[in-house]
Amino acid sequence: MKIALINENSQAAKNAIIEATLKKVVEPLGHEVFNYGMYSAEDKNQLTYVQIGILSAVLLNSGACDLVITGCGTGEGAMLAANAFPGVLCGHVVDPTDAYQFTQVNNGNCISLPFAKGWGWGAELNLQYVFEKLFVEEWGQGYPRERAVPEQRNKRILDEVKKVTHTDICYILENLDRELVLGALAGEKFQEYFFANAKCEKIIACVKALLA
């Protein structure tokens, strides 16, 4: 699994500890982490939580990643922004129980964490336990197991609803404020990671045109 890590500007100073904790958990399982920044609060390219939504949608819809790990101060803004876009199903994850139930019940492709709220002693341990619970079992099996069939049905229904209620990602990118979009795609390693991993030729062409 290709996992994208994205931090917005208010919590960018924590990027290194988040990346290290994530890699500690997922790399032994054979997953790859691609850190799209922000890497520090002083980065030239500043990401807002709205731009997290744009970047997450570009990465997930193009196939450049399979899962986005993101967040903001409370985790709420990043979640709302991510869910505003097609092809992104983002859950708000505060603790390991949230993480496990999101994978089993909602079977999404993006989680948003609160990187300021409650960030004190043991925060890095909670983060580690959250990441561990994301990968403890195959996703989408249902929880509790006797609820698996209706939960899996509801997930399929939600996916179909989003196809109708959300328009094409390329149309969105072409019609949003250009500076907003370019800012979301301006990260130091975006082009290196995106063009090496993206699979959808239509989105690749769209991104190339925007960056030209």
Image: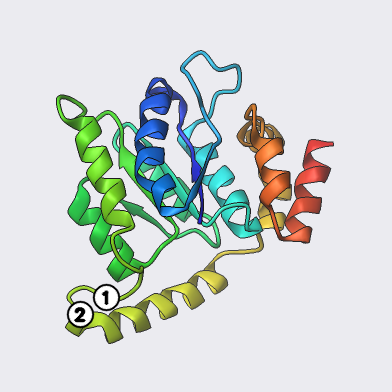
* Picture quadrant of residue 155: bottom left
- Residue 177 in sight: no
Question: Amino acid under label 1?
Answer: Gly
> What residue does disc 2 label?
145
Q: Please state, as top left, top right, bottom left or bottom right, where the C terminus lies in the image.
A: top right
Q: Is residue 34 above or below residue 60?
A: above
Q: Are marks 2 and 1 in contact (CB under 8 Å)?
A: yes
> What is the crowding at mark 1: few (fewer than 14 residues within 10 Å), some, or many (at least 20)?
many
Q: Position of residue 205 (x, y in %)?
A: 81, 52
Q: Position of residue 45 (x, y in %)?
A: 60, 22
Q: Is residue 161 left or right of residue 167?
A: left
Q: Is residue 37 above or below residue 57?
A: above
| Colour basis | rainbow
Residue projecting furthest to the top:
42
Question: Amino acid under label 2?
Answer: Arg
- Residue 135 in sight: yes
Residue at 64 percent across and 26 percent down: it is 188
> What residue does disc 1 label?
142
